[in-house]
Amino acid sequence: MPNQKGKVISESNIGGREVLTPRVPYIGETEINFICGNCNTMLVKGFNPAQYRNKAIRCMNCNKLNAV
């Protein structure tokens, strides 16, 4: 599966995004994995970008915010 890396953003750059804080990777239905832009931890297995529009995902490993 190919990986798509998140863009790490600061707390001050959240804007209108909803922040998701998973404890384990979310599971989707595509062939793409969404990984943390800082530490490469898998945040979404089977990533569909349309489902995560206007969202940021907080990494469960390094606590960084990843813009989708």
Image (cartoon, rainbow, N blue to C red):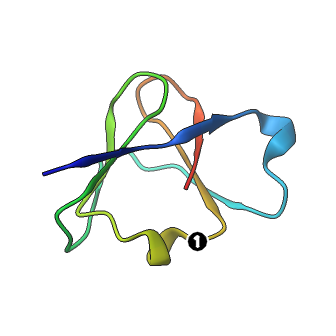
Whole-percent x, y for residue 29 in the image: 19, 74
Give the class, few, some or many, for how many residues have Cα within 10 Å of label 1's Cα (few <14, many ≥20): few
Res 24 visible:
no
* Residue named by callout 1: 53
Left or right of 31: which side holds 26? Answer: right
> At numbered mark 1, what does the secondary structure look like: helix, strand or loop?
loop
Left or right of 22: which side holds 1? Answer: left
Name the quarter where the C terminus is drawn.
Answer: bottom right
Who's the residue at 82% across and 43% down the image? Answer: 13
Whole-percent x, y for residue 52 in the image: 51, 69
Who's the residue at 49% across and 24% down the image? Answer: 38
Query: Which of these two is toward me, 33 or 12?
Result: 33
Who's the residue at 46% across and 76% down the image? Answer: 51
Q: Residue furthest left?
A: 1
Count the marks: how many?
1
Whole-percent x, y for residue 20 in the image: 55, 56
Q: Looking at the picture, which amino acid does disc 1 mark?
A: Arg
Res 23 visible:
yes
Query: Which of these two is toward me, 39 or 58?
Result: 39
Question: Up-down: is 41 above or below 13?
Answer: above
Query: Which of these two is toward me, 35 or 20?
Result: 35
Whole-percent x, y for residue 12 in the image: 87, 38
Question: Up-down: is 54 above or below 15?
Answer: below
Left or right of 2: which side holds 50? Answer: right
Question: Up-down: is 14 above or below 31?
Answer: above
Who's the residue at 23% across and 63% down the image? Answer: 46
